[in-house]
Image (cartoon, rainbow, N blue to C red):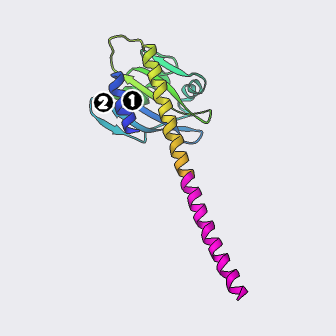
Amino acid sequence: FRSICEITSRALNVERISIWLFNGEDKMECADSYDEPAKEHSIGAVLGMKKHGRFFAMLKTDEKILSTDAEKDSVLRDISESLFKPYGTNISLISRIRLHGDVIGMICLEARSRDTMEWSPEEYDFAVTVAGFITLALETKEHLIADQEIKKSLKDKELLLREIHHRVKNNLQ
């Protein structure tokens, strides 16, 4: 996710970008967060469902969440203390990440200030496209894991067949 965050941050000229994935039903964990001015990545921050329930409900129902001032936004105020305030950002564009039809996370673009406080349709479309790339990366990972499991299973079965062949051959002699 590091490259996705860095490229997206530069393309949209935003200070921070983070990718969050649900970790079970009660929390969301930061898979990668990139701070463009500091050129630093971090992972592992957690947003709990109990504390931020309103935001999570909105994320599951709304395709996009746009805000020009997170502290004043009735829903984003919910996560502002945890997500935006520590980094001095308050302008956000959030797009859902879906996998197999389910919302599994979000990509969050954050800015401190912008020439215009509004997000353009092109910026939103770009964020949705990036969320799609993240979905593709996760699907590819799933396929690679499944492929490895199939290869291991075939190897185990091949070994079992050799053993059976050996035993049958010895019993026939």
Point out the residue furthest to the front here.
173
The stretch of residues the image draws in magenta is: 147-173
Point out the residue furthest to the left here.
38
Determine whether 83 is above or below 65 in the image.
below
From the image, which quarter does the N terminus lie in? Answer: top left
Determine whether 72 is above or below 150 in the image.
above
Residue at (51% x, 17% y) in the render: 74
Determine whether 66 is above or below 144 in the image.
above
Q: Is residue 164 magenta?
A: yes
Point out the residue furthest to the bottom here.
173
Determine whether 172 is above or below 70 in the image.
below
From the image, which quarter does the C terminus lie in? Answer: bottom right
* Amino acid bearing label 1: Ile
Q: Which residue is mark 2?
A: 36
For residue 50, side relative to residue 86 (left or right):
right
Question: Visible in this render: residue 27?
Answer: yes
Q: Secondary structure at mark 2?
A: loop
Comparing 104 with 152, the one in front is 152
Q: Earlier in the sequence, mark 2 or mark 1?
A: 1
* Amino acid bearing label 2: Glu
For residue 163, side relative to residue 122 (left or right):
right
For residue 173, side relative to residue 67 (left or right):
right
Q: Is residue 127 magenta?
A: no
Please report contact status of discs 2 and 1: CB closer than 8 Å, yes or no. yes
Q: Which residue is mark 1?
A: 17
Q: Secondary structure at mark 1?
A: strand
Badge 1 crowding class, 10 Å Cα cut-off, few under 14, some 14 to 19, many 20 or more, is: many
Residue at (33% x, 20% y) in the render: 112
Question: Visible in this render: residue 70?
Answer: no
